[in-house]
Amino acid sequence: MKVIGVIPARYGSTRFPGKPLARILNKPMIQHVYERVSQSEKLDGVIVATDHEEIKQVVEGFGGQVVMTRKDHETGSDRIAEVASKVDGDFFVNIQGDEPLIHHEIIDALISEAQEAPNAVVTAKTKIHSMEDVENPNVVKVITDHSKSALYFSRSPIPYNRSNQPFTYYKHLGIYGYPKQILNEFVKLPQSSLESAEMLEQLRLLENGYTVKVVETAYDAVGVDTPEDIEKVENILGGN
């Protein structure tokens, strides 16, 4: 199984235009992500998928691989699918380009799960430690069955804890691994009703009967959504 890691890096961002090029400790953010992802022992290649010439030049400048993609993709999955149509590979891992603290171990764990379940999409979850996050609609929750397959993803707390007994909630992390065939099928499907309601594209997979395996990890994503987040990431990288 040839596995390719793909990092979508779109220049346009409503809250933070040019985000992939933002400097973090004197390196562009996309370089931090690329170098961390490249530490994976199970990836056969790492590619930045971008729609912007300046990002392409920066990535090539630090020795990275780039594929230029269309500007009109609505989701990261659509951009990954375009890369899959141009690059030889059996399995593609969609890695967020705004997580400069990504751990390569979570990527390797996803690939190991994919080798055990070759006909499934794989993703990840981590424990939620505060009720504030449980109730925050920007923190997506996931529940799974005993075989680690996703039952549902939601912005609401799931399940509703009517019993008031202690319960562990899980946050869904936005990293996905797709077999090439499933990726190509997925992006051609129309938006599903649950997806439209929750604004979560992974629900399109569940509504159409695909299996989504969920790997548990201690890693919790620290994303850069606004310029103010740069200082937070620099403090973590600097050991503060």
Image: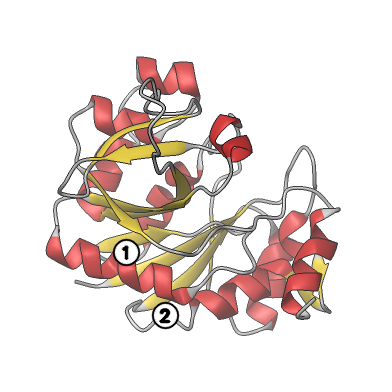
Q: Nearer the viewer, residue 72 or 239?
A: 239
Amino acid type for the residue under numbered disc 1: Leu
Residue 88, visible in the rendered structure = no
Name which residue lies at 23% across and 55% down: 179
Q: How would you rate the neighbour count of disc 1 (Cα within 10 Å): few for under 14, some for 14-19, many for 20 or more?
A: many
Give me the disc on residue 130: none
Left or right of 188? Residue 219 is: right
Quarter of the image where one finds residue 215: bottom left
The image's colouring method is secondary structure
Badge 1 element: helix
Asked if 101 appears above or below 132 in the picture, the reply is below
Spot occupied by residue 211 in the image (x, y as percentages of width and height): 19, 41
Give the residue type at disc 2. Answer: Ser
Horizontally, residue 79 falls left or right of residue 118, namely right
Residue at screen point 16% across, 46% down: 146
Which badge, 2 or 1, is on the more N-terminal residue? 2
Residue at 35% x, 30% y: name it: 203
Q: Quadrant of the C terminus?
A: bottom right
Quadrant for residue 97, please give it: bottom right
Badge 1 is on which residue? 110
Residue 40: which numbered mark, if any? 2
Label 2 sits on a secondary structure element that is loop
**Quick check: 194 left or right of 173?**
left
| Separation of marks 2 and 1 at Cα, in angstroms | 11 Å
Residue drawn at (65%, 51%), measured in percent from left and top? 10
Which one is nearer the viewer's eye here, 204 or 154?
A: 154
Which of the image's four quarters has the N terminus?
Answer: bottom left
Location of residue 196 with respect to 79 vertically, above or below: above
